[in-house]
Image (spheres, helix red, strand yellow):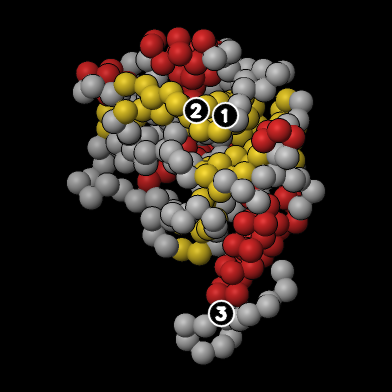
Amino acid sequence: MTHPICVTCGVQYAEPRPDCPVCEDERQYVGWDGQRWTTLAELRAAGHRGRVEPEGPGIVGVGAEPATAIGQRALLVRAPGGNVLWDMISYIDDDLVREVRALGGVSAVAISHPHFYGSMIEWARAFDAPVHIHAADRRWVARPDDAVVFWDGDTREIADGLTLINAGVHFAGGQVLHWRDGEDGRGALLSGDILQVVSDRDWVGFMYSYPNLIPERPRTVRRALRLLEPYPFARVYGAWWRRIVQTDGKEAVRRSAARYLDFALDDGPPGHGAPGRTL
């Protein structure tokens, strides 16, 4: 109830401090009114409540209303071997915990990158669930706890048919979650904003910083594509409500990367991508 939460990024810290390192990094920003803090008790008193709604077959969105911080929602993957909570929010209360328990609870948590760490320890303790984070992002964990499980390498299966992939976009430890059995066996990719589903929802974006408009390195995008290649997926679930590539998700990622690299590596006249560039 009293652990400080950064108002801008929504990350909960172990102890009070004057600064938020997550926001002071060049991929984020300090709020225009300066560094501000809140707590779960203050969010509840201000009228925030949980929001639980279906987002796709076997996938339920978990968020807050009104939204906090960046406004993302988490996703509960209702898998036969145990539910996985993908990504995280700042808000939690007893009513929200009860709603999620009624859906089967949470067996494991996995989070795409530090901007979405939110109140992960509160959620981990509420459900006695481990939190899977790539070791490359270890230094960004703002509230260290034994619930956090760090992993190394390119991929890690955390449950039957649920695999974390270290795409490395946005953050070195940036990870996405592939659900083999999602979409009636055609596969689903839960991407957070590692591969951000953009406004027209037929494409995804690749950025080192979204708020500060710093593009990702082409070599990082290529590596992410190589790691994703073995995994089929019909849909891509982004980080915000209804930000979903509904059909042919793998092709959407491929063509999005091709378009991105056309512009990132363009050596033609201004305003024109380099058509047909090989990935």
Precedes in sequence: disc 3 or disc 1? 1
**Label 3: how many Cα within 10 Å (few below 14, some 14–19, many 20+):** some
Q: What is the quadrant of the C terminus in the image?
A: bottom right
Number of residues whose C-alpha sits closer than 10 Å to that of mark 1, classed few (under 14), some (14–19) or many (20 or more): many
Disc 3 to disc 2: CB gap under 8 Å: no
Q: Determine whether the residue tagged by mark 3 lies in a helix, strand or loop.
A: loop
Q: How many marks?
A: 3
Looking at the rendered structure, the secondary structure element under dot 1 is strand
Residue type, mark 3 in image: Gly
In the picture, measured across the screen, residue 274 lies left or right of residue 10, that is right
Q: Residues within 10 Å of mark 2 (few under 14, many from 20)?
A: some
Q: Position of residue 229 (x, y in %)?
A: 76, 53
Instruction: List x then y, in percent, for residue 88.
Output: 48, 31
Query: Mark 3, mark 1: which one is toward the viewer?
Result: 1
Are discs 2 and 1 less than 8 Å apart at CB?
yes
Q: Is residue 248 left or right of residue 269?
A: right
Measure the alpha-carbon separation of dots 3 and 2.
Answer: 38 Å
Residue on which disc 3 sits = 273
Q: Which mark is residue 213?
A: none
- Residue at 56% in and 79% down: 273
Quadrant of residue 213 within the rendered picture: bottom left
